[in-house]
């Protein structure tokens, strides 16, 4: 969660500057400002603000934007404030809105709002994407903002001047200062620019989507969202946190690194804020969790999962320091409850083999693209400092690779998950 946010009491994903959603207050009325994903504002004149419900505010926003009834399910109100002062109210995607339901959206304004939010998360690298995927998504943004690709038109100049409107900033490796001053309009395009232009050129023009209600522009919004559906953390809620760095060097220096914890209906991802890649990705079937909030100590979210040490299976324990540890724990628990409630209507899958989220958006022909070697969405457990442990009956000890029962009782039931236990080998020596 960026700063302190709430989805009508639940954690939320957006980051905003210090700005209040109450612009003026009178004796009985207040002008409430609700921010959309594209930073436009919906002003609402509200009587008796202190007694109005989130549902009534939500309905007022839908009426102003003339959104269909399904927007009640697709969007939620988020309270956002980095420092818990003067929170802003935002109309954002509901973290509990399944991707399979999103596929049924045909209203162009709903698609546009979902597109704008997803685009913002991609451009700010809150959704880490490989370069190839960023180019495809950027090509669709070019089509939406610049119109159809026209051979012979100076599209390259437009793309170069607004490159960070189409690609994440960390991929826009352009010169600055004196070097940039010598780069004129006729300069040769760089690799990222050329890849973006190629993707723009390849965007297919469609007369409309699979519904008569969907326009050509709506079909491009949909294409962008479908591509984002391939990302395992799409639609998640974001939280601030820190993890321990692996010790390095002669002095065994460690320290911490800032991370974003992304929680969705499908699982938990820990994202490196600086490197813009995933450190750890776990489906709920693959983890146990708990949180601790001891007095005078920093709250911690604990994630336990299967791993290996020098090729031998072990239990690994990751410690995430965050003031929002309890919020994350509650959200994980609720997401698991929702997935279990929906499970009878979904096909059962083997717990022993690779599993994907059971939704129409996860097409088998598309998923392998995200498994490319070195993909930013693949886990990098070697960049984490984890604890390998075993319970010997009297306490928890770090051990040389061997495994026993879970340290935590909070996990998806064994009939649904693939998280397994192995009895320890008595011949394996312990480590302090």
Image (cartoon, grey):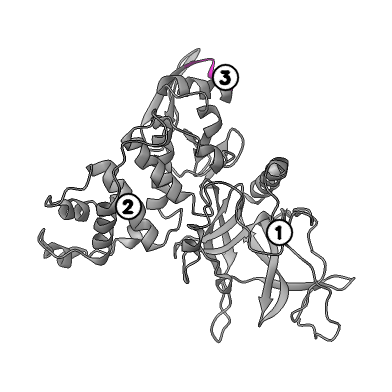
Q: Secondary structure at mark 2?
A: helix
Q: Is residue 226 above or below residue 298?
A: above
Q: Nearer the viewer, mark 3 or mark 2?
A: 2
| Residue 179 x, y percent position in the rendering | 16, 67
Q: Earlier in the sequence, mark 1 or mark 3?
A: 3
Q: Does 388 sit left or right of 138 as displayed?
A: right
Q: Which residue is mark 3?
A: 52
Q: Does 3 sit left or right of 288 as displayed?
A: left
Measured Cα–Cα span from mark 3 to mark 2: 41 Å
| Residue 223 x, y percent position in the rendering | 39, 45
| Magenta stretch contains residue 52 | yes
The C terminus lies in quadrant? bottom right
Of 107 and 14, nearer the camera is: 107
- Mark 3: few, some, or many residues within 10 Å (few <14, many ≥20)? few
Q: Which residue is mark 1?
A: 350
The span picked out in magenta is 46-53
């Amino acid at each position: 969660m960026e700063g302190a946010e709430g989805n009508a009491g639940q954690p939320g994903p957006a980051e905003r500057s210090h700005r209040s959603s109450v612009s003026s207050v009178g004796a009985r009325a207040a002008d409430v400002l609700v921010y959309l994903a594209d930073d436009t504002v919906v002003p609402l004149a509200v009587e008796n603000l202190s007694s109005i419900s989130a549902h009534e505010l939500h309905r007022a926003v839908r009426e102003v934007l003339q959104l269909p009834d399904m927007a009640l399910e697709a969007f939620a109100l988020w309270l956002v404030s980095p420092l818990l002062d003067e929170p802003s109210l935002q109309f954002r995607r509901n973290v509990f809105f399944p991707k399979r339901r999103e596929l049924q959206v045909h209203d162009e304004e709903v698609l546009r709002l979902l597109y704008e939010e997803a685009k913002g998360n991609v451009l700010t690298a809150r959704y880490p994407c490989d370069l190839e995927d960023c180019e495809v998504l950027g090509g669709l943004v070019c089509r939406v903002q610049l119109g159809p690709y026209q051979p012979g038109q100076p599209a390259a100049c437009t793309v170069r001047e607004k490159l960070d409107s189409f690609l994440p900033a960390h991929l826009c490796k352009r010169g600055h200062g004196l070097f940039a001053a010598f780069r004129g309009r006729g300069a040769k395009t760089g690799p990222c620019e050329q890849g973006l232009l190629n993707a723009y050129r390849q965007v297919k023009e469609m007369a409309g989507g699979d519904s008569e209600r969907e326009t050509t522009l709506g079909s491009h919004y949909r294409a962008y969202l479908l591509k984002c559906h391939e990302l395992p953390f799409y639609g998640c809620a974001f939280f601030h946190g820190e993890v321990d760095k692996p010790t390095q060097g002669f002095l065994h220096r460690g320290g911490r690194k800032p991370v974003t914890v992304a929680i969705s209906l499908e699982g938990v991802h820990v994202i490196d804020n600086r490197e813009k890649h995933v450190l750890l990705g776990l489906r709920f079937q693959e983890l146990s969790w708990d949180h601790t909030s001891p007095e005078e100590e920093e709250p911690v979210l604990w994630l336990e999962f299967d791993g290996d040490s020098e090729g031998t299976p072990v239990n690994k324990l990751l410690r995430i320091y965050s003031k929002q540890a309890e919020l994350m724990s509650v959200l994980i628990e609720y997401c698991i409850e929702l997935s279990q409630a929906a499970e009878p209507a979904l096909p059962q899958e083997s717990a022993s083999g690779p599993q994907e989220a059971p939704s129409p958006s996860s097409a088998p022909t598309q998923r392998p693209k995200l498994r490319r070697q070195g993909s930013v969405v693949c886990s990098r457990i070697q960049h984490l400092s984890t604890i390998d442990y075993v319970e010997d009956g009297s306490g928890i000890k770090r051990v040389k690779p061997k495994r026993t029962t879970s340290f935590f009782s909070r996990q998806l039931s064994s009939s649904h998950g693939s998280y397994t236990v192995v009895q320890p080998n008595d011949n394996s020596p312990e480590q302090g």
